[in-house]
Amino acid sequence: MPMSDHSSAAAAERPSRRSRLRPVGGTGCDESIEIIDLATPTTRSFEDFYAAKAGEVGRALALTLGDHALGLEAADEAFTKCFDKWGEVSGYDNPAGWVYTVGLNWGRSWLRRKARALARQASLATSSAVTVEALPAESVTAAVTDPQLRNALMQLSTEQRSVVVLRYFLDWSTEQTANSLDISPGTVKSRLARGLDHLRRQLTTADQHHG
Amino acid sequence: MAETPSFNPSPDSSGRDGAHHDHSDHETVEQRVQRHLRNEAELVPLLPVGTAATDRIQRRAVRAQRRRTVAVGSAMALTIAAAGFGALSTTAPTNDLITADQVNESVDVLNTPQESEASTSDGASDGAPNGESAPTVEALLASPGPTMAWSEIAESPPITSDVVVYNGSFIGLGSDNNNVVLWVSEDGTQWRPVESELNFRPWGLRAVGDALVVSGTAPSPDELDEGFIDENVRTAYSLDGGQTWIEPDLAPTDDSSQEVGEVSIAAIGDVVIAARTAFSPSGDVDTSLHRSIGGAAFEPLEISSFSISDFPDLRVIGDELQIGSYGSDSTVAVSTDGLTWVIEPDTSSTRDIVQSTPDRLIAFSYAEDAALIERSTDGGETWLAPFDLPAVNLLGAAVNEDGYVLTAFAEDWEPGTEDSFEIEPLTLEKDDLAITVTFGSDISELFVVDLETGEEIFRSQMVGDADEGPGIAYDEDLEVITITDLETDAVVVTFSEQEFADVIAASPLATAPEQFGPSTLIGFTEDGTEFSWQTTEDAFGLPGAAWADVTSDGSSILAVVLTAEGDSRVFIATGPEN
């Protein structure tokens, strides 16, 4: 069985090492980047930044993680870390992207720990596996206007869903999304394409089922 | 928004009404996705903003900083946090003693030399190396209370007395200390919960020299922020194996406005030293040392020869107290009596063994400004020069059968925070495009080094947990990770998924907590001789059992096992006769 060779292709399209620090004026972002309209990064206050971005980042995390309460908790954790490192983060091109990524990692970590605990509990009790996908569905599902689409979105990987949310909810450009998630623009595009393809297939199947 | 997809991006602002359900046949998936996301977003409450909100964030950040440097909590409490989210059903413990008879009724593997450990699945022989006889196994305790998610050993010198096990479960988002129960035993046969003896809820326990130190919190309403709860860190210690607990009064007498923060405690004999951090309303931190004899009131120590670092962590190494300073004048001061302190330039202090292969060990040490990887190829008899790796947090390490070490690192290491770093096994995930190595937090770099020579043969940037990094490939069918030389395209080294899955967290003993299946327990006798004990999947004759914790006192191994029935049992594996 040949090894997967996607890594070499991926390596060819991006630098082998990327810096986590993206100072203002750095490379990697084009002119389409939406700079927060709050003076210059060096003078932005955390308070202003928080007031401007708390709502959308919290909601983006809630949509990505599929759990509203967890998303808000993740945003709260991320903004707390942002406050702690504001001197550094305020110099980034897109501090909101940093907060989103930190919150996403926190939320995913929480879900993994929860899944592991549930899996262990299940294995001790019934020897049945429990995965993240098996976590109890949120009651909010019943309230959304398009539950089929929500279910389909939740079937995407978190990586794919985060790209979908950043592109279609926050309207971030490919470059902004790539920088925020620390992946290449090509990866953003391919994740988005695969994610949308999956959604189309799921929705078509659902429509046929209901039609 | 120059690159917003080419459809009408404007959401319907009329709210969530039936019209949104009526997606037209002409609506693209992209449009439908955008409309759905914006509609669902309206269901998500907005985070509160304004001065009160940012003030609350500021206080959370300060508390987080304090928690990161809490000495007593350390990895143990964090392990609880990592262990047990979920809807675990626990009942309040009672103060009833659990006797050995009760243990015997439910444990049928007492004093059974474990013939089932005669070989591992790969044919390795059991018992200690060099033909020594296999350790015998004795079960001491079953189900010390309700079914718990986690059990850990906090103290075991010697193993048959002063054994303390705590069980903990962790429920709920944002909570730190639900339902942690500490159990104490003087002889391993009778156990009692100690929680009722404390005036706060414990969430961490460890032995520091001759003291057992328990840390916890006593929540109280935030006076400045209605609706929020302050977690007030509390600390108590015991000099008698947990029979009695003393919560020292270390409130500043010269400045009543100061708030006592973290307290680190250590003891040698009846000499107890406490390092106290106090905060002033302005945020200034004041750190001081205090000394007590045999549990009497603490007296402040005048320390002028060195500056104690903020949030210091007292340790006992051998027969010496150690306290560190990780600032610009990095030093470690040592003392045998708490009165006379000598500054030592060598601050290498913490060594965690992270690999389970008997003859191939990796140790992670923290020094004044570096985190070092050391390795041994002779089971810890000798330690070779550290790898030349950057000072970052170690996330995990694995050795494959060819002797290559794979290590992963996280964010920049902040000296002094090593004890607070959350330890979890690395996990491997794969989606359509990428192999992702995750640890619950960012992994910044992966290294592969030759265990024998220390030569670095591969390095890859792993930014976040969203990318696989160049040169790393994964074969899903063979379950093999391949590291490829980027220049020659030649395969450098492979790790099987199992080897990768076996990557374990730092542990005092080289075994893998939580791991099902074969494991190697390694103990060290008083003269430094290693003995190991290979187990089969039926650990201790208990199919489906999972390791919770193991430790050794130099002649025996004490293990806590979570059984398939959902209870926890304590076992002793007696080492070889010397």
Image (cartoon, rainbow, N blue to C red):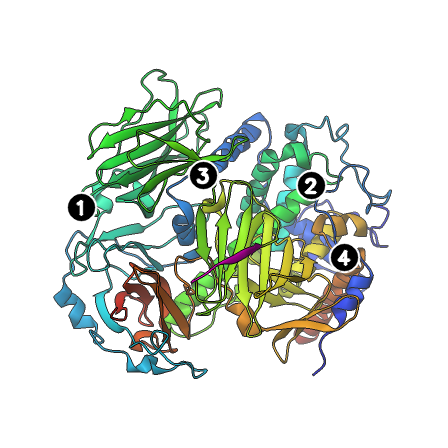
Q: Which residue is mark 3?
A: B67
Magenta segment includes A211: no
Callouts 1 and 2 on one subunit: no
Residue B423 point in image, percent of width and height: 48, 54
Mark 4 surroundings: few (<14), some (14-19) or many (≥20) residues within 10 A:
some
Quarter holding residue B520: bottom left
Quarter holding residue B116: bottom left
Residue B73 point in image, percent of width and height: 39, 44
Mark 1 surroundings: few (<14), some (14-19) or many (≥20) residues within 10 A:
some
Chain for disc number 1: B
Compare residues B305 and A168 and report the one nearer the observer: B305
Give the residues in magenta. Answer: B381-386
Q: Which residue is mark 2?
A: A96
Compare residues B347 and B158 and report the one nearer the observer: B347
In this picture, residue B114 sits left or right of residue B400: left
Quarter holding residue B518: bottom left
Q: Is residue B392 above or below residue A9?
A: above
**Residue drawn at the location 24% of the way across and 35% of the way down:** B271
Identify the secondary structure beneath mark 3. Answer: helix
Residue B142 point in image, percent of width and height: 23, 66
Tell whether label 4 touches label 2 (CB within 8 Å): no
Residue B171 shows up from this direction: no
Callouts 1 and 3 on one subunit: yes
Separation of residues labelled 3 and 4 (CA atoms): 36 Å
